Image (cartoon, grey):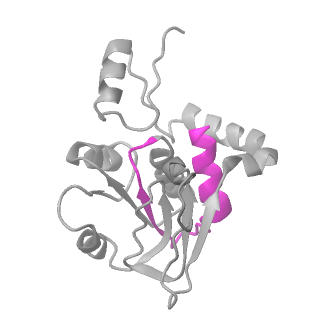
Amino acid sequence: MPDLTALLGVREKGHVTPETHQTISGAARACGSIAGQIGRLDGSERVVGICGSDQKCQTLVTELGFTVGINYKKGDISSALREHCPAGIDTVYTLTINIHTVQMNPGGHVILCGQISQYNKDVPYPPPLSEDTQETLERFVVLNYMEKHEEGLMQLSHWVKTGQKKVNLPQCMHYAFCFMMTGGNIGKQVVKISD
């Protein structure tokens, strides 16, 4: 499900073109790690990932093809976005409630994916953007695109088989579980038990 959520979210709401500058918050999570790879595969000029450790930032760049990773736990994230997105941001794919619209280009798109922690809150959702921008802010629910699931699964399968989309499959269940529980995993944690 996370792969389809990422694929259809980026394709249906992201408006990706070869010139697109894309930022992914929650970039080392299940959907975020896939959304960044898909943005790159679909031609985004720049894919910036926001995550919570230097090791995850390095993995985003060296293994998943992101342009740069930003560790939100180090320094001011607004300054980091200004530094790493000098031409602005066209699309933000966010899996967290913290929507980073610094450096958004006019007409940019914010895609809200998930955010289950906000479902029962008694506050306006999604949070409003600045009134002087022309940004769109849209929630994305993968179940609203059931008719596109089969085609999406075929595309994802092709990318995995051809090595264009990276999948992390640790061989040791104990290691995978411990890594997941300490926040060390990248993407969805899956263990291959047998062929």
Side (left or right) of 95 relative to 178:
right
Q: Against 43, is 152 above or below?
A: above
Residue 43 x, y percent position in the rendering: 53, 62
Side (left or right) of 164 relative to 142:
left
| Residue found at x 45% / y 19% | 191
| Residue found at x 72% / y 46% | 143
Q: Farthest bottom residue? A: 132
Q: Where, by quadrant of the figure, is residue 89 drawn?
A: bottom left
How many circles with numbers are drawn on the protein? 0
**Is residue 172 in view from this perspective?**
no
- The verdict on residue 25 being magenta is yes
Residue 35 x, y percent position in the rendering: 51, 51
| Residue found at x 62% / y 55% | 9
Magenta stretch in the rendered image: 1-29
- The verdict on residue 72 being magenta is no
Given residues 98 and 2, the one toward you in this image is 98
Q: Farthest left residue? A: 75
Q: Where, by quadrant of the figure, is residue 189 drawn?
A: top left
**Is residue 154 in view from this perspective?**
yes
- Quarter of the figure with the C terminus: top right
